[in-house]
Image: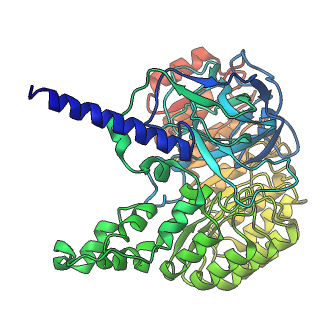
């Protein structure tokens, strides 16, 4: 008889867990915990499944292509497939700006923010709108070249085509995983197992990490499967994890609602404990050091335990460097308001990707900087579509010590607003990639910000005369170390000569897809002779690069680490051998679509120079 009681206890626990699970799914929506029900579910009643391709690309962080064409741009993700099931490098696909770890190994690389949670590894994103809001049952991503970059899929409660936007925009993670290395560059249909959500959506966001890829990933289309009516799950044979009896840990860790984080920021009620344990015996500095390894949400949770740790967790010294980008879906005006008292000493602030769709207002952002901007040295605001001229004015007035400003893909800022940046004479890094900065404002910035060391003007299509800009750089920006002129359409040998003469400290120069530069003018040999410190040089898609240019680089730029000459027809294997023999630090050489460099040559060079990654792309 005694053995019965343990069995009854186990059965009782199992029954309790089932009841508890049912209660939680009723309140939070079916399958809202990633650790819950894992097998054999079916939807009742049966709905007709709707299958739809993306209607429109709403937003993205970067793309390889030009702002004025369709080749290699994110806009190719709208509509039916253009390439799939073919594999290879095709202009009709969507391609992000970077891949691999090469961009982290060049002079313009930025130091990472500490306290980034381990489950956040996204580098780029794209948001897609679909015609009909549905409860998603599947998401198919058609990848046509070097797949494996997608790391997160999210769904939004807001309907981009609705005339009445919701009071609160909610994002749910449908699927998330660390980046993985996929064997081979061949096309595939990627269909991860997604979580069910309790609201219909027609706005899907893909986040990518290309750090493990050998080349640019290419996406062709995204297919959303879903039903109009919310599915009701029936349990058939289900498995319940023992960890399921934990509190709503997964919702806090993976959920994207704003309420949870804001409640943590604003906790004022503390538990009463008779003592603070052994923490009273530790030096204040030691406790601060221990807590410096916690993420922001973990700090907020720890602050609820006792008054001593509350004091430590709210100490402004814990918020000297603060990145809110991993929590972009949960940051709003209330979040910034709650953080103000903790951020009075903040020096690095990352608000990239935050604040869109009304989450952060101009007044909320301005109030925060007026309290917390005096010590700011670095401010990251990429893809901040709430930014306007008032915001830039507040930045220049409230952040007198600012040295680094990132406005990448802030394409909603009006052209005249960039004039305010000229007031920040201490700037050392300025990123204006894919912005509407105009020539007059940029000339003013270059004139007054003579301390600039890193400048990105990639895909800035509203600048009329890049030769004039280059001349001003040569005259005023003597300390320039990296310059991104990706896809600038009108720079000529005259501008390059002024640049090379005046900015001889340059270590990184991106002249990719600059069609007005011709090797016959001597512009590339001039660069090689006057810029001996070059470590990275991109001459992507310049068909005129020839053996003379490569030999000059080999003779003068022996510190070269990265060289991209994709698409040239004039470079021979012999000149590449000279380059590889001379530049001992070279680690990346892109010779894709170089007509004289076939696969046999690449194999030979790889065998003789094994420390160099030599890339040869193909199209089938």
Residue 487's spot in the image, x, y percent?
A: 79, 47
For the N terminus, give its image quadrant.
top left
Which residue occupies the foreground of this view, 603 or 378?
Answer: 378
Image quadrant occupied by the C terminus = top right
- Residue 414 at what x, y percent from top left? 85, 67
**Number of disc labels:** 0
Residue 118 shows up from this direction: no
Q: Is residue 311 visible?
A: yes
Instruction: Please identify the quarter of the rendering in which residue 66 is found.
Output: top right
Q: Which residue occupies the extreme right position in the image?
A: 464
- Name the residue: 65% across, 19% down: 187
Image check: 475 left or right of 536?
right
Q: Nearer the viewer, residue 319 or 29?
A: 29
Residue name at image x 37 percent, y 71 percent: 303
In the displayed image of the protein, which residue is found farthest to the front?
Answer: 1
Horizontal arrangement in the rendering, residue 551 relative to residue 340 (left or right): right
Seen in the picture, residue 419 relative to 68 is either above or below; the reply is below
80, above or below 430, in the image: above
Q: Position of residue 318 (x, y in %)?
A: 41, 73
What's the colour scheme? rainbow
Across and down, in percent, residue 105 comes to: 51, 49
Q: Is residue 69 above or below residue 256?
A: above
């Amino acid at each position: 008889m005694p053995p019965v009681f343990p069995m009854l206890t186990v059965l009782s626990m199992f029954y309790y867990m089932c009841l508890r699970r049912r209660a939680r799914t009723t309140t939070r929506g079916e399958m809202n915990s990633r650790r819950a029900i894992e097998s054999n579910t079916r939807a009742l009643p049966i709905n007709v499944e709707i299958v739809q391709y993306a209607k429109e690309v709403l937003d993205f962080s970067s793309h390889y292509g030009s702002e004025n064409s369709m080749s290699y741009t994110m806009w190719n993700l709208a509509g039916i497939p253009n390439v799939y099931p073919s594999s290879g490098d095709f202009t009709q696909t969507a391609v992000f700006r970077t891949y691999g770890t090469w961009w982290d190994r060049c002079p313009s690389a930025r130091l990472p923010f500490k306290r980034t949670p381990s489950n956040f590894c996204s580098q780029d994103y794209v948001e897609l709108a679909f015609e009909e809001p549905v409860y998603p049952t599947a998401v198919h991503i058609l990848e046509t070249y070097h797949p494996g970059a997608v790391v997160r899929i999210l769904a939004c409660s807001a309907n981009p085509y609705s005339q009445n936007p919701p009071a609160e925009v909610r994002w749910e993670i449908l699927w998330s995983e660390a980046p993985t290395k996929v064997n081979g560059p061949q096309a595939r249909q990627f269909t991860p197992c997604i979580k069910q959500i309790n609201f219909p959506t027609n706005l899907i966001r893909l986040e990518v990490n290309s750090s493990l890829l050998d080349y640019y990933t290419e996406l062709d289309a995204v297919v959303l499967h879903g039903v109009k009516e919310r599915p009701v799950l029936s349990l058939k044979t289900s498995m319940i994890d023992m960890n399921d009896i934990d509190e709503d840990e997964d919702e806090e860790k993976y959920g994207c609602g704003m309420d949870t984080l804001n409640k943590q920021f604003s906790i004022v009620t503390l538990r009463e404990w008779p003592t603070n344990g052994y923490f009273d015996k530790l030096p204040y500095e030691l406790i601060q050091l221990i807590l410096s390894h916690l993420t922001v949400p973990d700090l907020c949770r720890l602050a609820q335990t006792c008054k001593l740790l509350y004091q430590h967790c709210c100490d402004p010294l814990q918020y000297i460097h603060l990145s809110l980008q991993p929590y972009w879906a949960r940051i709003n005006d209330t979040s910034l308001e709650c953080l103000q008292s903790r951020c009075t000493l903040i020096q690095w602030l990352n608000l990239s990707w935050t604040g869109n769709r009304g989450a952060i207002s101009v007044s909320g952002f301005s109030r925060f900087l007026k309290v917390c901007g005096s010590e700011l040295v670095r401010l990251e605001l990429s893809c901040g579509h709430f930014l306007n001229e008032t915001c830039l004015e507040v930045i220049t007035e409230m952040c007198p010590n600012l040295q680094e400003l990132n406005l990448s893909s802030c394409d909603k800022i009006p052209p005249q607003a960039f004039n305010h940046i000229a007031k920040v004479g201490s700037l050392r890094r300025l990123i204006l990639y894919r912005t509407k900065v105009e020539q007059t404002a940029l000339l003013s910035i270059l004139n007054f910000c003579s301390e600039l060391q890193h400048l990105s003007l990639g895909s800035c299509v509203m600048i009329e005369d890049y030769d004039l800009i280059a001349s001003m750089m040569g005259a005023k920006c003597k300390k320039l170390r990296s310059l991104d002129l990706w896809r600038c359409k009108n720079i000529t040998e005259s501008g390059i000569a002024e640049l090379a003469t005046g900015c001889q400290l340059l270590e990184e120069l991106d002249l990719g897809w600059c069609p007005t530069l011709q090797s016959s003018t001597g512009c590339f040999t001039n660069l090689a002779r006057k810029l001996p410190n070059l470590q990275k040089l991109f001459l992507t898609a310049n068909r005129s690069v020839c053996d003379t240019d490569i030999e000059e680089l080999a003779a003068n730029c022996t510190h070269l680490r990265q060289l991209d000459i994709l698409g040239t027809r004039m470079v021979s294997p012999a000149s590449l051998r000279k380059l590889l023999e001379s530049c001992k630090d070279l680690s990346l050489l892109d010779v894709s679509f170089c007509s004289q460099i076939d696969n046999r040559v690449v194999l030979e060079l790889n065998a003789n120079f094994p420390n160099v990654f030599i890339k040869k792309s193909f199209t089938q």
